[in-house]
Image (tube, grey):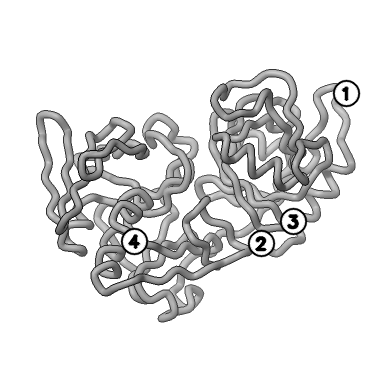
Amino acid sequence: MFTKNNHYPTEKHKEKTSFGSFIMKSFLATTLLIMPAMHTLETPTAQAHSVSHHVNIVINGKVKQFENSPFISNGTTYVPIRYVSETVGAKVKWDQKTKGVTITKEDMNISFVAGQRGATINGQKVDMPSAQLIKGTTMVPLRFVSEALGLEVAWDAQYKTALIGDTNLVELETLGLDEVKLEVLDWSVANNAFPIGTEATVTDVETGRTFKVKRTYGANHADSEPLTASDAQVMKELWGGSYSWTPRAIILEFGDKKLAAAMHSFPHSVQKITNNGYNGHFCIHFQNSTRHKDGRIQQSMQQKVQEAANSGM
């Protein structure tokens, strides 16, 4: 299913994006590799547990292969920067001494330093997930580059595929792409599959809205925190305007994993993220996970885990 890379990708509520002009289409195609970014991520090398190389790029109905494979790290899709120059016709300049990169196309100038967060667009400083040097290749975040150039892309969460150009040309199942299937993991497995420090995208089963979280604590279940103040606000809105202990069914996506789970939103106890406007952490439960206070399974959580499993998302 297609989703606008706004809060990165959900699968249930798909939305196809369109391109305003031929130039934008060609650039998108060129930037796609840079794609999914979504929310935060930082260096793939520093957080290898949350890196997935299960990423497909489809341009005008054709699957593209690259010598340096695109990957997703904590929700951000990275692609080789050379793809931008080869496909879109933008000029790319590399400074070996400073590790600086400059992308120029018509009246647009984008510059950044590999390994450092942030970039400059036409002289204005903006936030950007840090570009990465992987085996001598500069990998850049697709979302940032595409947005900086005024481009849009479509994302299919079911197949972990970024689509550029005419997204109506092909049905993904006909391309032989591997579908990312929803899993229901027992806590004994989920605890290791979703380790502390991992960032993920949460999709609310009932509404299809998404937000980003990070697991920060927890042994009986996954104690987590909203990644940003915007994510915290989405959570509050989903629970009717105030945080609550009432569980909701969710889908948790990170790397090449898509897991059925449940969570409440009430902030309590310790926290690690201090700039998200959320004082404490909340709890994410999986099949047979238990409460901290008494080590017992919470049936209301388990019912929501099952609801997520049966959602077809």
Tell me the SS state at disc 3: helix
Task: Give the image location of residue 209, x and y in percent.
Answer: 64, 54
Query: Looking at the image, is mark 1 or mark 2 earlier in the sequence?
Result: 1
Instruction: Select label 1 or label 2 by which is in front.
Output: 2
Q: Residue at x 68, y 27 (%)?
A: 281
Q: Secondary structure at mark 2?
A: loop
Q: Give the left or right position of residue 200, taking residue 222 as reference.
A: left
Q: Are marks 2 and 4 in contact (CB under 8 Å)?
A: no
Which kind of residue does numbered mark 3 sit on?
A: Ala
Q: Which badge, 3 or 1, is on the more N-terminal residue?
A: 1
Amino acid type at image mark 2: Met
Mark 4 = which residue? 151
Give the spatial CA distance, label 1 vs label 2: 32 Å
Asked which secondary structure carries label 4, the reply is loop
**Left or right of 241, for residue 133:** left
Q: CA distance from mark 4 to mark 3?
A: 35 Å
Q: Marks 1 and 4, how far apart in space? A: 51 Å
- Asked whether, in this view, residue 274 is left or right of residue 138, the answer is right
Which residue is disc 2 drawn over? 313
Disc number placed over residue 294 in the picture, else none: 1
Give whichever of discs 1 and 4 has the lower sequence position: 4
| Residue under numbered circle 3 | 309
